[in-house]
Image (cartoon, helix red, strand yellow):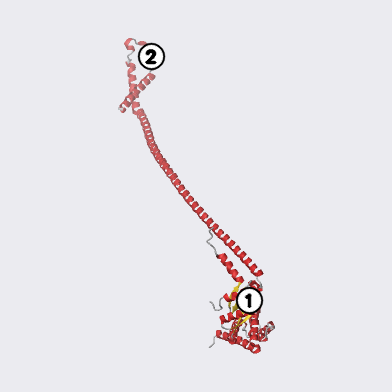
């Protein structure tokens, strides 16, 4: 007899699979990656707005009201993603959003053999740099890599890469911070 | 002997009293005989006068010996007893006084000794208290000095750490400024390439 945890897990996997498969059928890998990017932004918004997530999970609303609310809130998103989110809200599964996101990334990696690597730098990458980065990350991760490039001047220089919850921080600001900590912590005992 | 002397004096007194009484009782007879007699007879008593006088004297003596003298003797004995009692009492008082005086002197000496011991004890206690206070004051002073040293040391370390932190911040700030302003895009890309090649792996633990 399946317990509650297993049911939750199966639900999460079902939502993620539906999303990946529907996106792939609609537009191939690019569509899957596009929905991935939208999903990431939506997750960020939901996490930073407790009222929104509470409303989506609230039992004081009827399932139909929650579904309508989700459709209206995520109207700008891809229809596939908006529909899945609306169904989750209707069924009272919106609290599983983070787990669906993780499962979506796993499905993406498993079915398309693709890992999205977020790359942050202070200047735009040229083709040569992209090639270097892709070669390195593909060698590390063992999958095809798609880069998501971001510009952040606060890094001062260098590069910040993250994939599957792991990251490599080779930015100048982190190295300076490390140097600052070393300078502050390196005491000779205080005798002078 | 005392009793004998007392009896002799009693008899002489009785004679004197009898003579006086006779003289007073028969004054005319005495003057008559003085006028008529002469020579030795002048000094010898006339028998006619003498015998009544003697009889009167004896009667008087008997009366006095029978009734007067015992009362007089009783008075004397009473007086003697009173004086004797007074003397004995006085002697007892004197002895008691001497005893009390000795007692007082003893108590005074004891009080003096006690006072001396109290003073000595107080002095001893005072010295002990003084020593204790001094020791405590010295210990407190030492603790305060120790604390002050620790506080100074902590302040020194804090100041040094603060200075070191400030210098680190300043150095990093200057380095940040230099890197941020002086590097071109191409130089940034070269740095990125170098960092990517030197960076660790995603699979690294």
**Are the numbered discs 1 and 2 placed on the same chain, yes or no?**
no
| Picture quadrant of residue B98 | top left
The spot of residue A108 in percent (x, y) is 60, 85
Residue projecting furthest to the bottom: A25
Q: Is residue B38 above or below residue A89?
A: above
* Residue, disc 2: B31
Task: Say few, some or many: other residues with alpha carbon within 10 Å of mark 1 (under 14 / 14 to 19 / 20 or more).
Answer: many
Which residue is labeled 1 in the image? Answer: A120
Q: Residue at x 60, y 79 (%)?
A: A132
Q: Position of residue A122 (x, y in %)?
A: 65, 74
| Of the two numbered discs 1 and 2 in the rendering, the one whose residue sits closer to the viewer | 1
Q: Chain of mark 2?
A: B
Give SS at disc 1.
Answer: strand
Separation of residues labelled 1 and 2 (CA atoms): 185 Å
Marks 1 and 2 in Cβ contact (< 8 Å): no
Q: Nearer the viewer, residue B119 or B166?
A: B166
Are there few (<14), some (14-19), or many (20+) residues within 10 Å of tag 2? Answer: few
**The C terminus of chain A: image quadrant:** bottom right
Q: Quadrant of residue A68?
A: bottom right
B80 horizontally vs A31: left or right: left
Q: Chain of mark 1?
A: A
Is residue A54 in sight in this rendering? Answer: no
Q: As rendered, which of B166 and B22 lies closer to the eye?
A: B166
Q: Is residue B41 left or right of residue B159?
A: left
Q: Secondary structure at mark 2?
A: helix
Location of residue B74 (image quadrant): top left
Residue B126 lies, in percent from the top left, at 46, 47
Residue at (55% x, 65% y) in the render: A185
């Amino acid at each position: 007899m399946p317990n509650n945890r297993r049911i939750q897990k199966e639900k999460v996997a079902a939502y993620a699979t539906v999303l990946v498969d529907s996106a792939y059928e609609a537009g191939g890998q690019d569509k899957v990656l596009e929905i991935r990017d939208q999903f990431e932004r939506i997750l960020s918004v939901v996490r930073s707005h407790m009222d929104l997530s509470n409303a989506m999970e609230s039992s004081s609303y009827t399932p139909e009201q929650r579904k309508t609310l989700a459709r209206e809130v995520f109207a700008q998103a891809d229809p596939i993603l908006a529909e899945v989110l609306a169904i989750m809200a209707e069924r009272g599964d919106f609290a599983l959003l983070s787990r669906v996101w993780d499962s979506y990334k796993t499905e993406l990696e498993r079915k398309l053999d693709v890992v999205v690597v977020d790359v942050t730098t202070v200047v735009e990458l040229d083709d040569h740099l992209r090639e270097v980065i892709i070669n390195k990350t593909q060698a590390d991760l063992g999958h095809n890599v798609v880069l998501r490039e971001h510009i952040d001047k606060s890094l001062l220089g260098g590069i910040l890469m993250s994939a599957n919850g792991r990251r490599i921080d080779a930015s100048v600001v982190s190295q300076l911070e490390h140097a600052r900590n070393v300078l502050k912590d390196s005491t000779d005992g205080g005798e002078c | 002997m005392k009793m004998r002397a007392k009896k002799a004096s009693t008899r002489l007194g009785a004679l004197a009293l009898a003579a006086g009484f006779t003289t007073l009782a028969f004054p005319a007879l005495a003057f008559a005989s003085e006028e008529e007699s002469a020579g030795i007879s002048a000094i010898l008593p006339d028998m006619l006068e003498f015998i009544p006088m003697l009889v009167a004297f004896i009667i008087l003596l008997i009366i006095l010996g029978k009734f007067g003298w015992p009362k007089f003797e009783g008075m004397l004995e009473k007086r003697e007893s009173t004086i004797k009692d007074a003397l004995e009492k006085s002697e007892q008082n004197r002895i008691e006084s001497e005893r009390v005086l000795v007692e007082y002197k003893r108590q005074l000496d004891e009080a003096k000794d006690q006072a001396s011991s109290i003073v000595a004890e107080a002095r001893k206690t005072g010295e002990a208290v003084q020593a204790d206070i001094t020791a405590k004051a010295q210990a407190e002073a030492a603790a305060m000095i120790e604390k002050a040293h620790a506080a100074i040391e902590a302040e020194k370390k804090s100041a040094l750490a603060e200075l070191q932190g400030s210098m680190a911040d300043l150095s990093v700030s200057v380095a940040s400024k230099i890197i941020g302003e002086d590097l071109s895009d191409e130089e940034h890309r070269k740095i990125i390439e170098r960092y990517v090649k030197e960076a660790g792996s995603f699979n690294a633990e």
